[in-house]
Image: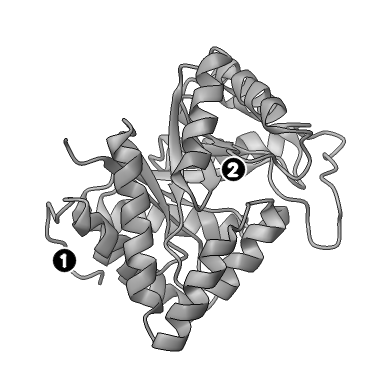
Amino acid sequence: MSSPRVSFEFFPPKSLEASFRLWDTVRMLAPLAPEFVSVTYGAGGTTRKLTHEAVTTIGAQFGLNVAAHLTCVDATRAETLEIAAAYAQAGVREIVALRGDPPKGQGRFTPNPDGFASSVELIEALAATGRFTLRVGAYPEPHPEAGDTLADVRWLKRKFAAGADSAITQFFFEPETFLRFRDTCAREGINGRIIPGIIPIENWSGIRKFALATGTSVPQWLDDAFEKATRDGREELLATALCTEMCDRLVREGVEDLHFYTLNRAHLARDVCHALGIVPQVALEKVA
């Protein structure tokens, strides 16, 4: 059984301290030779400039294939395509095309009158440029605005038809969640590449809140396990073991790609990769 391809997600820093943490994280994970790394876009497009700076710096300093997140939020079509053109000019060849979350205080996404109304429209426009590999989002459990998983799967099929090259899923806590989703996608005629999104649990209470906000199921056994691990001071050991076990199960079920949501912290993702047989391929010089 060969080792899976891996990729990592980072978010743009908003302070000097956060910048140092990001660069330390990239420096630690880059030697694992990820297929790509991605940089997120804040809710409501709030980190647009920071995302661009992080994307171009990571590509230039570390030589990694960087995918920039791009959303439909709070921008016209022309503005969005200008951002994409600037990425292309900077040598960026991959985009994670998303509808995006509404700005804080807005309950639902409301498109700009002159903007893209959905991720499918954005994907179509980016695909028409012929400049990018396009990755999109997928939901192994129902999106908060979707009726059920089948509705999500059929929307994902439209994304692939619009020009998506691959999809990255929202995180989940049990491998069966992804495997059921993959089977449903296959039954609906989707044969595009679907990459499971993996979140190493650095802080259970924080991840738990995030999961509930995004519609991700939180199994009772996981609450119980972290409650006991916290009492025993073994949270990191538990997190590494659970993440490694889930990734190993996915690989044994034929999954060839794993995308890690790092939250700009490298240790758990690195340790899980090492446990899966993914070892450093290159040595990197320190960022000047």
Query: Residue 285 — which label?
Result: 1
**Place of residue 31 in the rendered image (x, y in percent of width and height, measured from the top left):** 19, 57
Q: Is residue 82 left or right of residue 167?
A: right
Q: Nearer the viewer, residue 158 or 254?
A: 254
**Sequence-wise first label, 1 or 2:** 2
**Place of residue 131 in the rendered image (x, y in percent of width and height, measured from the top left):** 46, 26
Q: Which residue is mark 2?
A: 70
Residue 4: image quadrant is top left
**Place of residue 253 in the rendered image (x, y in percent of width and height, measured from the top left):** 33, 33
Q: Is residue 256 above or below residue 190?
A: below
Residue plotted at (46% across, 87% down): 231
Q: Secondary structure at mark 2?
A: strand
**Place of residue 215 in the rendered image (x, y in percent of width and height, measured from the top left):** 69, 51
Tell me the amino acid under the disc marked 2: Leu
Residue extending furthest toward the top = 189
Q: Is residue 47 left or right of residue 27?
A: right
Task: Decide if residue 123 is in sight here.
Answer: yes
Task: Decide if residue 45 is in sight here.
Answer: no
Tell me the amino acid under the disc marked 1: Glu
Q: Nearer the viewer, residue 58 or 141?
A: 141
Residue plotted at (71% across, 59% down): 213
Give the quarter of the figure containing the N terminus. Answer: top left
Give the quarter of the figure containing the C terminus. Answer: bottom left
Tell me how far mark 1 sits from mark 2, CA to CA. Answer: 30 Å
Q: Is residue 217 left or right of residue 251?
A: right
